[in-house]
Amino acid sequence: MPDFWNQVILSNPVKRYIFVATAIILGLLFRRILSRYLAGLLFRVVKRIGSGVDKDSFVNLLIAPLESFLLILVTIVSVEKLHFPEAFDFDVYEINVKIILQGIATSVLIIAFFWLLLRIIDFVAMILEWKANASKDMRDNQLITFFRDFLKAVISIIGLLMVLGIAFGFEVKNVWTGLGIAGAALALATKESIENLIASFIIFFDKPFTIGDILKVNNITGTVEKIGLRSTRIRTDLKTYVTVPNKQMVDSIVDNQTLRTQRKAEIRLQIGLSASAGKIQQLIDGIRRILKKDKIENPTVFLNDIGGNAFLIHVDFFTPPIALNAFNDIKQQVNFEILDQMEAIQVELAAATTDVKIIGNKEKGVRNKE
Protein backbone atom coordinates (compact mmCIF):
# COMPACT_ATOMS: atom_id res chain seq x y z
CA MET A 1 0.00 0.00 0.00
CA PRO A 2 2.76 2.54 0.80
CA ASP A 3 4.20 1.85 -2.62
CA PHE A 4 0.86 2.78 -4.17
CA TRP A 5 0.70 6.13 -2.32
CA ASN A 6 4.23 6.96 -3.40
CA GLN A 7 3.83 5.79 -6.97
CA VAL A 8 4.76 8.64 -9.29
CA ILE A 9 2.41 9.52 -12.15
CA LEU A 10 3.21 12.51 -14.36
CA SER A 11 5.91 13.79 -11.99
CA ASN A 12 3.65 13.62 -8.89
CA PRO A 13 2.97 10.87 -6.32
CA VAL A 14 -0.56 9.48 -6.06
CA LYS A 15 -1.04 10.83 -2.54
CA ARG A 16 -0.53 14.37 -3.84
CA TYR A 17 -3.24 13.86 -6.49
CA ILE A 18 -5.58 12.56 -3.80
CA PHE A 19 -4.82 15.57 -1.61
CA VAL A 20 -5.59 17.97 -4.47
CA ALA A 21 -8.76 16.08 -5.43
CA THR A 22 -9.93 16.08 -1.80
CA ALA A 23 -9.38 19.83 -1.49
CA ILE A 24 -11.34 20.48 -4.69
CA ILE A 25 -14.20 18.18 -3.63
CA LEU A 26 -14.40 19.88 -0.21
CA GLY A 27 -14.46 23.25 -1.91
CA LEU A 28 -17.23 22.02 -4.19
CA LEU A 29 -19.26 20.72 -1.24
CA PHE A 30 -18.84 23.69 1.08
CA ARG A 31 -18.79 26.51 -1.46
CA ARG A 32 -22.50 27.28 -0.94
CA ILE A 33 -22.16 27.52 2.86
CA LEU A 34 -18.99 29.61 2.67
CA SER A 35 -20.47 31.82 -0.04
CA ARG A 36 -23.54 32.59 2.05
CA TYR A 37 -21.34 33.39 5.04
CA LEU A 38 -19.17 35.79 3.03
CA ALA A 39 -22.25 37.34 1.43
CA GLY A 40 -23.62 37.94 4.93
CA LEU A 41 -20.42 39.73 5.92
CA LEU A 42 -20.59 41.91 2.79
CA PHE A 43 -24.23 42.59 3.50
CA ARG A 44 -23.33 44.17 6.83
CA VAL A 45 -21.17 46.68 4.97
CA VAL A 46 -23.72 47.35 2.22
CA LYS A 47 -26.55 47.71 4.74
CA ARG A 48 -25.01 50.95 5.98
CA ILE A 49 -25.94 52.59 2.67
CA GLY A 50 -29.62 52.41 3.47
CA SER A 51 -32.08 50.84 5.86
CA GLY A 52 -34.66 48.31 4.74
CA VAL A 53 -32.24 46.45 2.45
CA ASP A 54 -33.37 42.93 1.60
CA LYS A 55 -30.68 40.47 2.71
CA ASP A 56 -32.06 37.57 0.67
CA SER A 57 -31.93 39.63 -2.53
CA PHE A 58 -28.33 40.59 -1.83
CA VAL A 59 -27.26 37.03 -1.05
CA ASN A 60 -29.04 35.60 -4.09
CA LEU A 61 -27.39 38.18 -6.31
CA LEU A 62 -23.87 37.36 -5.06
CA ILE A 63 -24.17 33.64 -4.47
CA ALA A 64 -23.35 32.58 -8.06
CA PRO A 65 -20.21 34.72 -8.59
CA LEU A 66 -19.03 33.98 -5.03
CA GLU A 67 -19.36 30.23 -5.54
CA SER A 68 -17.52 30.40 -8.85
CA PHE A 69 -14.75 32.58 -7.41
CA LEU A 70 -14.21 30.36 -4.34
CA LEU A 71 -14.21 27.14 -6.37
CA ILE A 72 -11.74 28.57 -8.90
CA LEU A 73 -9.53 29.90 -6.08
CA VAL A 74 -9.47 26.55 -4.24
CA THR A 75 -8.79 24.69 -7.49
CA ILE A 76 -5.90 26.95 -8.48
CA VAL A 77 -4.32 26.90 -5.01
CA SER A 78 -4.66 23.10 -4.84
CA VAL A 79 -3.30 22.47 -8.32
CA GLU A 80 -0.31 24.71 -7.48
CA LYS A 81 0.83 21.96 -5.07
CA LEU A 82 1.44 19.66 -8.03
CA HIS A 83 4.68 19.61 -9.97
CA PHE A 84 4.23 20.40 -13.60
CA PRO A 85 4.54 17.14 -15.58
CA GLU A 86 7.71 16.92 -17.61
CA ALA A 87 5.72 15.27 -20.41
CA PHE A 88 3.83 18.53 -20.93
CA ASP A 89 6.92 20.71 -20.77
CA PHE A 90 7.05 21.87 -24.35
CA ASP A 91 6.49 25.08 -26.30
CA VAL A 92 3.57 26.16 -28.45
CA TYR A 93 4.50 28.96 -30.83
CA GLU A 94 7.61 29.61 -28.71
CA ILE A 95 5.55 29.89 -25.52
CA ASN A 96 5.82 27.25 -22.83
CA VAL A 97 2.62 25.32 -22.09
CA LYS A 98 3.07 25.90 -18.36
CA ILE A 99 3.03 29.67 -18.89
CA ILE A 100 -0.09 29.37 -21.06
CA LEU A 101 -1.95 27.31 -18.45
CA GLN A 102 -0.91 29.65 -15.64
CA GLY A 103 -2.13 32.62 -17.66
CA ILE A 104 -5.47 30.96 -18.36
CA ALA A 105 -5.95 30.01 -14.69
CA THR A 106 -5.07 33.50 -13.47
CA SER A 107 -7.36 35.06 -16.09
CA VAL A 108 -10.28 32.91 -14.98
CA LEU A 109 -9.67 33.88 -11.35
CA ILE A 110 -9.50 37.61 -12.18
CA ILE A 111 -12.64 37.40 -14.32
CA ALA A 112 -14.53 35.63 -11.51
CA PHE A 113 -13.42 38.32 -9.04
CA PHE A 114 -14.51 41.19 -11.27
CA TRP A 115 -17.79 39.41 -11.98
CA LEU A 116 -18.34 39.56 -8.23
CA LEU A 117 -17.51 43.28 -8.19
CA LEU A 118 -19.99 43.96 -11.01
CA ARG A 119 -22.72 42.17 -9.08
CA ILE A 120 -21.97 44.28 -6.01
CA ILE A 121 -22.23 47.43 -8.14
CA ASP A 122 -25.61 46.23 -9.45
CA PHE A 123 -26.91 45.69 -5.94
CA VAL A 124 -25.64 49.05 -4.64
CA ALA A 125 -27.30 50.72 -7.63
CA MET A 126 -30.51 48.83 -6.85
CA ILE A 127 -30.44 50.15 -3.27
CA LEU A 128 -29.87 53.72 -4.45
CA GLU A 129 -32.70 53.39 -7.00
CA TRP A 130 -34.98 52.12 -4.25
CA LYS A 131 -34.14 55.16 -2.13
CA ALA A 132 -34.53 57.49 -5.12
CA ASN A 133 -37.98 56.04 -5.91
CA ALA A 134 -39.11 57.19 -2.50
CA SER A 135 -38.71 60.80 -3.67
CA LYS A 136 -40.72 62.54 -6.37
CA ASP A 137 -37.66 63.76 -8.26
CA MET A 138 -36.90 61.21 -11.01
CA ARG A 139 -33.60 62.86 -11.95
CA ASP A 140 -31.76 60.85 -9.29
CA ASN A 141 -32.87 57.61 -10.96
CA GLN A 142 -31.30 58.45 -14.30
CA LEU A 143 -28.11 59.63 -12.57
CA ILE A 144 -27.84 56.30 -10.75
CA THR A 145 -28.37 54.34 -13.96
CA PHE A 146 -25.78 56.44 -15.78
CA PHE A 147 -23.07 56.05 -13.16
CA ARG A 148 -23.85 52.35 -12.71
CA ASP A 149 -23.19 51.73 -16.41
CA PHE A 150 -20.17 54.05 -16.41
CA LEU A 151 -18.62 52.45 -13.32
CA LYS A 152 -19.19 48.95 -14.70
CA ALA A 153 -17.43 49.98 -17.92
CA VAL A 154 -14.45 51.33 -15.94
CA ILE A 155 -14.28 48.19 -13.78
CA SER A 156 -14.37 46.00 -16.89
CA ILE A 157 -11.47 47.94 -18.45
CA ILE A 158 -9.44 47.62 -15.23
CA GLY A 159 -10.17 43.89 -15.17
CA LEU A 160 -9.00 43.53 -18.78
CA LEU A 161 -5.77 45.39 -18.01
CA MET A 162 -5.18 43.17 -14.98
CA VAL A 163 -5.63 40.06 -17.12
CA LEU A 164 -3.09 41.40 -19.61
CA GLY A 165 -0.64 42.55 -16.92
CA ILE A 166 -0.85 39.82 -14.28
CA ALA A 167 -1.88 36.77 -16.27
CA PHE A 168 0.08 37.28 -19.47
CA GLY A 169 2.89 39.58 -18.34
CA PHE A 170 2.17 42.55 -20.57
CA GLU A 171 3.64 45.87 -19.47
CA VAL A 172 0.57 47.90 -18.53
CA LYS A 173 2.51 51.14 -19.00
CA ASN A 174 3.22 50.17 -22.57
CA VAL A 175 -0.45 49.28 -22.98
CA TRP A 176 -1.45 52.73 -21.73
CA THR A 177 1.07 54.35 -24.06
CA GLY A 178 -0.27 52.34 -26.96
CA LEU A 179 -3.80 53.22 -25.97
CA GLY A 180 -2.82 56.90 -25.88
CA ILE A 181 -1.42 56.81 -29.40
CA ALA A 182 -4.26 54.70 -30.70
CA GLY A 183 -6.72 56.81 -28.75
CA ALA A 184 -5.69 59.97 -30.57
CA ALA A 185 -6.36 58.31 -33.92
CA LEU A 186 -9.51 56.71 -32.57
CA ALA A 187 -10.74 60.05 -31.25
CA LEU A 188 -10.60 61.52 -34.73
CA ALA A 189 -12.45 58.54 -36.18
CA THR A 190 -15.08 58.51 -33.44
CA LYS A 191 -15.48 62.25 -33.00
CA GLU A 192 -19.28 62.13 -32.92
CA SER A 193 -19.35 59.29 -30.38
CA ILE A 194 -17.06 61.25 -28.05
CA GLU A 195 -19.22 64.35 -28.47
CA ASN A 196 -22.29 62.28 -27.59
CA LEU A 197 -20.51 60.93 -24.51
CA ILE A 198 -19.61 64.43 -23.34
CA ALA A 199 -23.18 65.55 -24.07
CA SER A 200 -24.48 62.73 -21.87
CA PHE A 201 -22.48 64.14 -18.93
CA ILE A 202 -23.97 67.57 -19.63
CA ILE A 203 -27.49 66.11 -19.61
CA PHE A 204 -26.97 64.30 -16.32
CA PHE A 205 -25.43 67.23 -14.51
CA ASP A 206 -27.49 70.05 -16.03
CA LYS A 207 -30.70 67.94 -15.90
CA PRO A 208 -32.78 69.73 -18.57
CA PHE A 209 -35.02 66.66 -18.68
CA THR A 210 -35.36 63.26 -17.09
CA ILE A 211 -36.85 59.85 -17.77
CA GLY A 212 -40.62 60.12 -18.11
CA ASP A 213 -40.62 63.74 -19.33
CA ILE A 214 -42.54 64.66 -22.49
CA LEU A 215 -40.22 66.48 -24.89
CA LYS A 216 -40.44 68.17 -28.25
CA VAL A 217 -37.11 68.22 -30.07
CA ASN A 218 -36.37 68.37 -33.80
CA ASN A 219 -40.08 68.04 -34.65
CA ILE A 220 -40.24 64.89 -32.51
CA THR A 221 -42.65 64.77 -29.58
CA GLY A 222 -42.66 61.89 -27.13
CA THR A 223 -41.79 60.50 -23.71
CA VAL A 224 -38.19 59.91 -22.64
CA GLU A 225 -37.73 56.21 -21.83
CA LYS A 226 -33.94 55.97 -21.47
CA ILE A 227 -30.91 58.25 -21.37
CA GLY A 228 -27.77 56.38 -22.35
CA LEU A 229 -24.10 57.19 -22.76
CA ARG A 230 -24.54 57.87 -26.48
CA SER A 231 -28.20 58.61 -27.15
CA THR A 232 -31.62 59.33 -25.67
CA ARG A 233 -34.55 57.02 -26.47
CA ILE A 234 -37.96 58.63 -26.95
CA ARG A 235 -41.36 56.94 -27.33
CA THR A 236 -43.25 59.20 -29.74
CA ASP A 237 -46.97 60.02 -29.86
CA LEU A 238 -47.25 57.49 -32.69
CA LYS A 239 -45.76 54.85 -30.32
CA THR A 240 -42.59 54.59 -32.39
CA TYR A 241 -39.19 54.33 -30.71
CA VAL A 242 -36.80 57.11 -31.73
CA THR A 243 -33.10 57.28 -30.87
CA VAL A 244 -31.72 60.82 -30.73
CA PRO A 245 -27.94 61.39 -30.29
CA ASN A 246 -27.18 63.19 -27.05
CA LYS A 247 -25.27 65.88 -28.94
CA GLN A 248 -28.48 66.89 -30.68
CA MET A 249 -30.33 66.85 -27.37
CA VAL A 250 -27.82 69.39 -26.05
CA ASP A 251 -27.42 71.55 -29.15
CA SER A 252 -31.09 71.64 -30.19
CA ILE A 253 -33.94 73.62 -28.63
CA VAL A 254 -35.69 71.14 -26.33
CA ASP A 255 -39.25 71.92 -25.22
CA ASN A 256 -39.84 70.06 -21.95
CA GLN A 257 -43.62 69.98 -21.93
CA THR A 258 -43.74 68.13 -18.61
CA LEU A 259 -42.38 71.21 -16.83
CA ARG A 260 -45.08 73.49 -18.21
CA THR A 261 -47.06 75.43 -15.62
CA GLN A 262 -50.18 75.81 -17.82
CA ARG A 263 -51.73 74.65 -21.10
CA LYS A 264 -52.87 77.32 -23.56
CA ALA A 265 -55.91 77.13 -25.85
CA GLU A 266 -56.43 79.44 -28.82
CA ILE A 267 -59.70 79.96 -30.70
CA ARG A 268 -59.94 82.27 -33.73
CA LEU A 269 -63.41 83.41 -34.82
CA GLN A 270 -64.04 85.09 -38.17
CA ILE A 271 -67.48 86.73 -37.92
CA GLY A 272 -69.33 87.82 -41.04
CA LEU A 273 -69.50 91.55 -41.87
CA SER A 274 -73.29 91.45 -41.64
CA ALA A 275 -73.04 91.36 -37.81
CA SER A 276 -73.61 94.70 -36.12
CA ALA A 277 -71.30 96.21 -33.52
CA GLY A 278 -73.86 95.49 -30.81
CA LYS A 279 -73.99 91.80 -31.68
CA ILE A 280 -70.18 91.61 -31.78
CA GLN A 281 -70.05 93.12 -28.28
CA GLN A 282 -72.84 90.78 -27.15
CA LEU A 283 -70.88 87.77 -28.50
CA ILE A 284 -67.69 88.86 -26.73
CA ASP A 285 -69.53 89.30 -23.41
CA GLY A 286 -71.15 85.89 -23.84
CA ILE A 287 -67.80 84.17 -24.48
CA ARG A 288 -66.34 85.82 -21.39
CA ARG A 289 -69.17 84.37 -19.32
CA ILE A 290 -68.55 80.95 -20.87
CA LEU A 291 -64.89 81.07 -19.82
CA LYS A 292 -65.79 81.60 -16.17
CA LYS A 293 -65.33 77.89 -15.41
CA ASP A 294 -63.23 75.76 -13.14
CA LYS A 295 -59.80 74.86 -14.59
CA ILE A 296 -59.89 77.87 -16.94
CA GLU A 297 -57.35 80.55 -16.05
CA ASN A 298 -56.43 83.98 -17.49
CA PRO A 299 -59.07 84.12 -20.26
CA THR A 300 -58.76 86.81 -22.94
CA VAL A 301 -61.49 87.71 -25.47
CA PHE A 302 -61.24 90.77 -27.74
CA LEU A 303 -61.98 92.06 -31.24
CA ASN A 304 -58.54 91.83 -32.79
CA ASP A 305 -59.11 93.12 -36.33
CA ILE A 306 -61.68 94.47 -38.75
CA GLY A 307 -60.89 93.08 -42.18
CA GLY A 308 -62.38 93.37 -45.58
CA ASN A 309 -64.00 89.94 -45.29
CA ALA A 310 -64.62 89.38 -41.56
CA PHE A 311 -64.39 90.60 -37.99
CA LEU A 312 -61.57 88.66 -36.26
CA ILE A 313 -62.17 87.77 -32.59
CA HIS A 314 -59.33 86.23 -30.56
CA VAL A 315 -60.16 83.86 -27.70
CA ASP A 316 -57.27 82.68 -25.49
CA PHE A 317 -57.35 80.87 -22.17
CA PHE A 318 -55.13 78.69 -20.01
CA THR A 319 -55.68 75.57 -17.94
CA PRO A 320 -53.54 73.90 -15.27
CA PRO A 321 -50.99 71.34 -16.60
CA ILE A 322 -53.64 68.63 -16.87
CA ALA A 323 -53.56 65.58 -19.15
CA LEU A 324 -54.01 66.20 -22.86
CA ASN A 325 -57.33 64.33 -23.04
CA ALA A 326 -58.80 66.43 -20.24
CA PHE A 327 -57.51 69.61 -21.90
CA ASN A 328 -59.13 68.63 -25.21
CA ASP A 329 -62.44 67.95 -23.44
CA ILE A 330 -62.43 71.45 -21.91
CA LYS A 331 -61.58 73.07 -25.24
CA GLN A 332 -64.31 71.10 -27.03
CA GLN A 333 -66.90 72.09 -24.44
CA VAL A 334 -65.95 75.77 -24.83
CA ASN A 335 -66.25 75.49 -28.62
CA PHE A 336 -69.75 74.02 -28.39
CA GLU A 337 -70.91 76.69 -25.97
CA ILE A 338 -69.55 79.43 -28.25
CA LEU A 339 -71.50 77.92 -31.15
CA ASP A 340 -74.65 77.91 -29.00
CA GLN A 341 -74.03 81.56 -28.10
CA MET A 342 -73.64 82.49 -31.78
CA GLU A 343 -76.89 80.73 -32.66
CA ALA A 344 -78.71 82.46 -29.80
CA ILE A 345 -77.76 85.97 -30.97
CA GLN A 346 -77.91 85.01 -34.67
CA VAL A 347 -74.27 85.66 -35.55
CA GLU A 348 -72.68 83.66 -38.35
CA LEU A 349 -69.12 82.92 -39.35
CA ALA A 350 -67.68 84.79 -42.29
CA ALA A 351 -67.68 81.77 -44.59
CA ALA A 352 -71.37 81.23 -43.90
CA THR A 353 -72.33 84.76 -45.09
CA THR A 354 -70.32 84.88 -48.30
CA ASP A 355 -72.52 84.91 -51.38
CA VAL A 356 -71.33 84.41 -54.93
CA LYS A 357 -73.52 85.82 -57.70
CA ILE A 358 -73.03 84.98 -61.34
CA ILE A 359 -74.50 87.48 -63.85
CA GLY A 360 -74.76 86.31 -67.40
CA ASN A 361 -74.75 88.58 -70.49
CA LYS A 362 -76.71 86.76 -73.14
CA GLU A 363 -75.79 89.19 -75.94
CA LYS A 364 -72.00 89.13 -75.40
CA GLY A 365 -71.81 85.69 -73.81
CA VAL A 366 -69.81 87.06 -70.90
CA ARG A 367 -70.17 86.11 -67.25
CA ASN A 368 -69.05 88.31 -64.39
CA LYS A 369 -68.50 87.40 -60.75
CA GLU A 370 -69.19 89.69 -57.88
Image: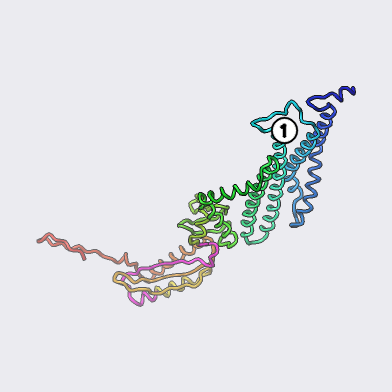
Residue 5 percent across, percent down from the top left:
87, 25
Q: Is residue 256 magenta?
A: yes
Q: Nearer the viewer, residue 151 or 237?
A: 151
Task: State the colouring used for the structure image.
Answer: rainbow
The reply to whether residue 232 is in sight is no
Q: Which residue: 39% across, 67% down?
A: 268
Picture quadrant of residue 76: top right
71 versus 53 height, above or below: above
The reply to whether residue 196 is in sight is yes
Residue 331 percent across, percent down from the top left:
47, 64
**Tag 1: residue type?**
Lys
Q: Nearer the viewer, residue 19 or 264?
A: 19
Q: Is residue 345 left or right of residue 153?
A: left
52 versus 90 height, above or below: below
Q: Is residue 51 left or right of residue 92?
A: right
Residue 2 percent across, percent down from the top left:
90, 23
What residue range appears in magenta?
255-282
Residue bearing the label numbered 1: 98
Furthest residue in direction front, as rendered: 94
Q: Secondary structure at mark 1?
A: helix
291 versus 86 height, above or below: below
Q: Is residue 196 magenta?
A: no
Picture quadrant of residue 20: top right
Q: Which residue: 66% across, 42% down?
A: 170
Furthest residue in direction left, as rendered: 363
Residue 113 percent across, percent down from the top left:
72, 44
Say few, some or many: other residues with alpha carbon within 10 Å of mark 1 (under 14 / 14 to 19 / 20 or more): some
Q: Nearer the viewer, residue 343 or 267?
A: 267
Where, quadrant-wise, is the N terminus in this rendering?
top right
Q: Nearer the viewer, residue 321 or 241?
A: 241
Where, quadrant-wise, is the C terminus in this rendering?
bottom left
